């Protein structure tokens, strides 16, 4: 078998955010403002994502993969009321167990849907 040697490091969330174009940065900022407008919600930026906590409970995460923005919310993706939103269930992964509903933000419509879902939190 061939052995692979990987050199280099992964980019941090701040570096990925800085590399985004203006439209994507505006989308991240709009989501961030909507989350921080809620009472007692605080932001924590780690290497991989930005986590938003209500007290000690995680209610949302924003991650950047390539040029796409992913919003993870503490909603049940199997809920019938949320069936019209293209949510992906990531509850089987340990790092997303608290925020299992994932929505990709790639357009203005997706951003509007994200802001509506944030209101439901």
Image (spheres, rainbow, N blue to C red):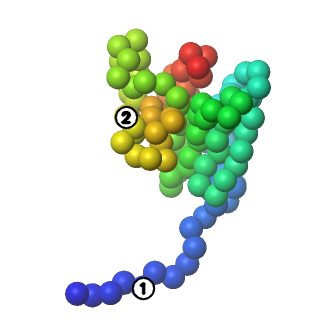
Using the rendered image of the protein, determine whether residue 40 is visible from the camera's viewpoint.
Answer: yes
Residue at the location (75% across, 35% down)? 42
Q: Which residue is mark 1?
A: 5
Judge by depth and name the residue closer to the eye, 98 or 49. 98
**Neighbour tally class for label 2: few under 14, some 14-19, many 20 plus, Cα within 10 Å:** some
Question: What SS does tag 1 mark?
Answer: loop
Q: Where does the image place residue 90, in percent across and percent down from the top left? A: 39, 39
Q: Which residue is under mark 2? A: 89
Horizontal and vertical percent for residue 54? 68, 29
Residue 84 in sight: no
What residue do we see at 56% from left, 67% from top? Answer: 10
Quarter placement of the N terminus: bottom left
Name the mark on residue 99: none
Would you identify the image quadrant in which residue 62 lies?
top right
Between label 1 and label 2, give the one nearer the viewer.
2
Q: Is residue 85 left or right of residue 35?
A: left
> Tag 2, which secondary structure?
strand
**Picture layout, residue 85 above or below residue 61:** above
Where residue 47 sits, quadrant-wise, is: bottom right
Picture coordinates of residue 80, whole percent (x, y): 35, 13
Q: Is residue 12 left or right of residue 117?
A: right
């Amino acid at each position: 078998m061939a052995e692979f040697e990987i050199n280099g490091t992964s980019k941090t969330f701040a570096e990925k955010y800085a590399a985004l174009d203006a439209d994507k940065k505006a989308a991240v900022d709009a989501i961030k403002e909507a989350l921080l407008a809620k009472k007692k919600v605080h932001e924590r930026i780690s290497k991989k994502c930005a986590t938003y906590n209500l007290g000690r409970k995680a209610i949302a995460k924003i991650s950047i993969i390539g040029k796409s923005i992913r919003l993870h919310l503490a909603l049940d993706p199997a809920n019938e009321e949320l069936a019209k939103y293209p949510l992906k269930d990531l509850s089987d992964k340990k790092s997303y167990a608290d925020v299992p509903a994932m929505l990709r933000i790639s357009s203005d419509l997706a951003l509007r849907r994200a802001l509506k879902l944030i209101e439901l939190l």
